Amino acid sequence: MNSLKVVVLSSGDQLMGNFEFDLSSNHFIIENPVMLKPVREENNILLIPYLLPTSNTQVLLNRQYLVFEPLEPNEHLIQMYNDLFSQMKK
């Protein structure tokens, strides 16, 4: 997987991760998903690993729960995401 995207769910939650679409099941497969939370800090966004307490690195997301199709993140979010996962692998 190599397609880093951001989505907004119908619940209002924002997720970012490496997306792949499975045509057979109408689901997105998201690898290493994180939730995006606005905060009152310098970066203004907090990345929260979505699957931290599990050994899974992927989740399935039904397309019907998206507000819109996955979008490209800006460079700042990409850098934050890459930094987070490079630190987690250490």
Image (cartoon, rainbow, N blue to C red):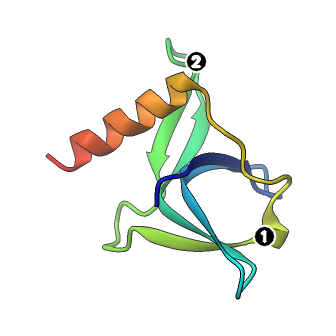
Please state the horizontal and vertical placement of residue 31, each as a whole percent of the image.
47, 62
* Pick the front one: 11 or 78: 78
Q: Residue at x 46, y 70 (%)?
A: 58
Please state the horizontal and vertical placement of residue 9, each as a whole percent of the image.
76, 56
Please state the horizontal and vertical placement of residue 43, each as a whole percent of the image.
51, 18
The vertical placement of 52 against 62, above or below, is: above
The vertical placement of 37 against 56, above or below, is: above
- In the image, 50: left or right of 38? left
Q: Residue at x 34, y 66 (%)?
A: 53
The vertical placement of 78 against 90, above or below, is: above
Tag 1: amino acid: Arg
> Could you say which disc has been placed on residue 40 in the image?
2
Q: Which residue has dot 1 on it?
A: 63
Tag 2: amino acid: Arg
* Pick the front one: 2 or 54: 2
Q: Nearer the viewer, mark 1 or mark 2?
A: 1
> Could you say which disc has been placed on residue 88 in the image?
none
In the rendered image, which quarter is residue 23 located in?
bottom right
Q: Earlier in the sequence, mark 1 or mark 2?
A: 2
Q: Secondary structure at mark 1?
A: helix
Q: Secondary structure at mark 2?
A: loop
- In the image, 20: left or right of 1? right
Please state the horizontal and vertical placement of residue 26, each as a whole percent of the image.
75, 80
